[in-house]
Amino acid sequence: DNLLCHMGHICVPASEQQKMIWEAHFSKTAGHFGVDKTLAVLQKHFYWPNLKTDV
């Protein structure tokens, strides 16, 4: 499947990280979550260094 994983989470390249944050925070299916909920949604499936700081 050509996905790089870290402890069961998909590793997100730097070029896609801001897009992932935006999608988790603002998308029609996600609603408009605050920082804590946005972070929880991302951490459930994804990984990148400094994810918590970036959100």
Image (spheres, rainbow, N blue to C red):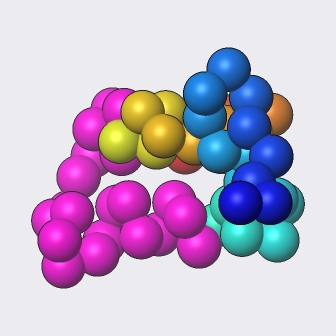
Q: Quadrant of the C terminus?
A: top right
Drawn side of residue 28 relative to residue 2, left or right: left
Residue found 80% across the figure and 34% down from its top: 49
Seen as rendered, the residue at the extreme front is 1
Q: Which residue sits at x=72%, y=69%?
A: 16
Q: Can I make out residue 39 in this image?
A: no
Query: Where's residue 15, x and y in %?
Result: 82, 71
Closer to the camera in the image, 5 or 12: 5
Q: Quadrant of residue 32?
A: bottom left
In the current view of this chain or complex, which residue is farthest to the top?
Answer: 7
Which is the main secondary structure of the residues drawn in magenta?
Answer: helix
> Could you say where residue 41 lies in the image, as x and y percent from the top left?
35, 42
Q: Which residues are magenta?
A: 19-40
- Extreme residue toward the bottom, this view: 28
Asked whether the viewer can see residue 8, the reply is yes
* Quarter of the rendering containing residue 19: bottom right
